[in-house]
Amino acid sequence: MAKWIVKVVTLLLLLWGPSGVAISEKINLYTDYASFRGEGDLTLVEIYYSFPRQELSFSKGEKGYLAIIDISAEVTRGGKSVWSRNWSFGTKVNAEYEEREPSTIFDFIRLWLIPGDYSYSLTLRDRGSGLEGSATKSLKVRAYPGGKLQMSDIEIAYSIQNGDSTSRFYKNGLEVLPYPRSAYGPNYPVLFFYTEAYNLGFPFQTNYELSYSIFDVQGKLVKKFPSRLHQKPGSSAVLTGGVNVISLKPGEYSLKLLLRDEATSDSAWVTKGFFLLPPPRPEEAFTEEIAQQRRDEISYLATNKELKTFDGLSLQGKREFLRQFWRSRDPDPSTPQNEFKNEYYRRWRYAVDHYSNFDRKDGWQSDMGRIYILYGPPDQIERNPFESGQRAWQKWTYYVKEGGFYFIFIDLEGVGHYTLVHSTAKGEKKDPNWRRYLNQ
């Protein structure tokens, strides 16, 4: 299998709007790294990254639907490049509906570096939509000399299980899937970790002790777990485990692993940061009036078939329909926040507040409101006020989506209620002779 082949793992992730319009205006890219003992004077470094597959744009081909991603990565030290690479890969689904099925893409970069302080940058670009995701972070590469008890960096993992050597994520008998986001919540309560111990003392028939502790951002101990004894397999060992963190309050924390060698009484420790996200808000009372309101709110996202199904359900059925509707569009169900839903309702509220006419709260139904909800704030707005003999009009331009497009709105009634008369976006109203509406 080629070195840069990506393994796709289903995780319940989704972030797409109607007709392929991405609610996110960039690809959500998560990165992390860990270093391990290498060879000679070099340290082995792994840079992990992941992103939701549903943020990609798929095109129909002969054998399914394909998205192609271009990736560039660079490691610098003191402002000078020490390693860089550009590559591309494709991910395929067999049917169009699978584009919306929850999944994420994991991969990592493995390289050997001289110990020291570096930084790394990673950028990926979806060829279909032109959307990009990027990250730049510091990279501290540790040295692992012999003779002293040491632990590698901690790799936070999505899962750890017995592995097959054919897996890209295989190491030391295990398949370790990285979790670069390092964020936890009710749907993802357990933090899994992988680290390595070096230079355990002789005799090897003795034990080493491993203990876990969690500290808050101020360095205060908030939770301590019982230590465990393990027999040494030799001068080095693989250390793995899982810590349930769901009882912690939302915030930033660090996991500390402490290793003690019984034979030599030497000790070593290492830490890793992670996050606990806030719990979801309590559910409101659900009535027929609220159900109708929620139907209005999803009408720009749902298909006609989905709306017809919704209309035929009982009140409890409608409530469950809405749960499933938003859950299927959640980019990361491991957290209590649904970024897609939050962004959609932010746009909805903005449309109601800014495009409602007189005392009617119907701004979401206006042409400007609908476009704002579906496409987000324009990159540029050209405002042309009322002039003698000519109506007021506006031009909204989006530069990135679908290669760029614009919308033309005209105040046909002269009361500040703008109507969409022309657009270059796919599926929107087109009228190249729209300027004829400018004359009163």
Image: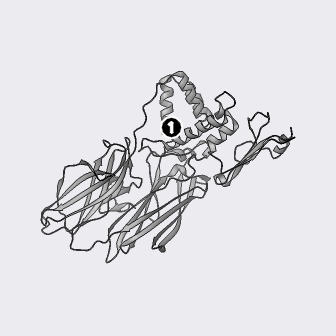
In the rendered view, does 395 fall on the left or right side of 104? right
Give the position of the N terminus as an image quadrant: bottom left
- The answer to whether residue 88 is above or below residue 66 is below
Q: Position of residue 84 (x, y in %)?
A: 49, 71
Q: Quadrant of residue 390?
A: top right
In this picture, residue 429 sits left or right of residue 116: right
Type of the residue with mark 1 = Trp
Q: Position of residue 331 (x, y in %)?
A: 48, 46
Q: How many numbered marks appear?
A: 1
Residue at 53 percent across and 60 percent down: it is: 124
Which part of the image, by quadrant, shows the C terminus?
Answer: top right
| Residue drawn 57% across the image and 54% down it | 66
- Residue pictured at 74% horizontal, 35% vertical: 416
Q: Nearer the viewer, residue 305 or 363?
A: 363
Q: Is residue 132 visible?
A: yes
- Disc 1 is placed on an element classified as helix
Q: Which residue is mark 1?
A: 326
